[in-house]
Image (spheres, helix red, strand yellow):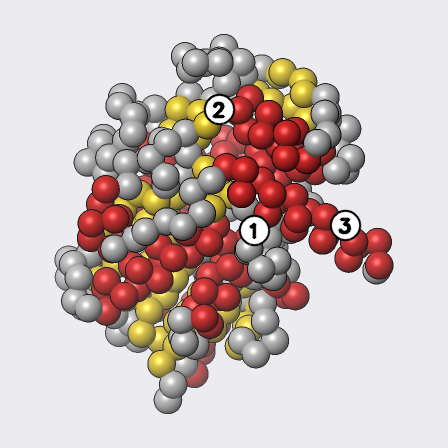
Amino acid sequence: MTTSVLVTGGAGYIGSHMVLGLLEAGETPVVLDNLSSGFRWAVPGNVEFVTGDCGDATLLSSLFDRYHFDAIIHFAAKIVVPESVTDPLGYYRNNTANACTLLECAVQHRVPRFVLSSTAAVYGEPAVSPVTETARTSPINPYGCSKLMVEHMLADVASVHPLSYAALRYFNVAGADPAGRAGQSGAHATHLIKIAVQAALGRRDGMDIFGSDYSTPDGSCVRDYTHVSDLVAAHIDALRYLRAGGQSITCNVGYARGYSVFEVIDTVKRVSGVDFDVRVKARRAGDPASLVASNDRARAELGWTPKHDNLETIVRQALAWERKLGLESAAA
């Protein structure tokens, strides 16, 4: 039986890029996605695809019986911070309870490795910047709490079962596949760069930003924007690390420098050559002022070396993908 890697949420934004990265690395990915926010067309036709939910124990058991998985890369989760504030139970059910079911099946079928899509939201409002993995975890929204609970579950499970894991705490993922094969495609995406490029292309009537009175240099939130291809590389590196016998590990994935909301918008306007309306609204609940990663651990332990650390490059590729979506939509 061929050894495979299960990619949950593999039809989504990051997951679809992960599938491409695994194929390029000579792996055999199998995708599980309920298509609540992903797209079937985002997964190459030569990749096994199963429509379903990570909380469906019967489906998971059948899937684990059919394939020999030597690792799980778990992306399937809700990720919108304001939505988590208004729908906490939905986030705990989808992100935490479903992960528990997935972990239980992994243990029953002796899957030895697990790579978790975690988040910088577990830090809440960090006291220092860049924030290291040893910083206190104190999430300020249900999204961050739901992910931190999964980290705790992984640590507890790994302490009593033959499973090693890597929990990768993302900062802000952005951009698109440099070859134009994948990108952020959701119609209701909330990521800043996605919204800004849509505004630049006239697909939105300008855009809103939330808060200009934070304790940051220009008053807007500061984030560490990481190219999606570099994020995929971190997962490949984590998988290689675990297969080589590495101990379970938690790593930040970011560039160790941040840009404010206003700086990102200015970059989109400059790269696109288009001015658009920017409306300042009140702060959103659950948004920290600044989140910037220390990436020393990922570099030293995983051997991660980012290759796309350039905001203009990230914006150009996001614009190219958004234009491609527009052309395909018009052709349809």
Place residue 330 in its image quadrant: bottom right
Mark 2, residue position: 260
Name the one closer to the observer, 87 or 177: 177
Q: CA distance from mark 2 to mark 3?
A: 28 Å
* Mark 3, secondary structure of its residue: helix
Q: Quadrant of the C terminus?
A: bottom right
Place residue 166 in its image quadrant: bottom left
> In the rendering, which numbered label is found on residue 74?
none
* Mark 2, secondary structure of its residue: strand
Residue type for callout 1? Ala
Mark 1, residue position: 176
Which of marks 3 and 2 precedes in the sequence?
Answer: 2
Q: CA distance from mark 1 to mark 3?
A: 15 Å
Q: Position of residue 212 (x, y in %)?
A: 53, 13
Residue type for callout 2? Ser
Q: How many marks?
A: 3
Vertically, is 256 above or below 29? above
Q: CA distance from mark 2 to mark 1?
A: 20 Å
Mark 3, residue position: 326
Name the one closer to the observer, 13 or 196: 196
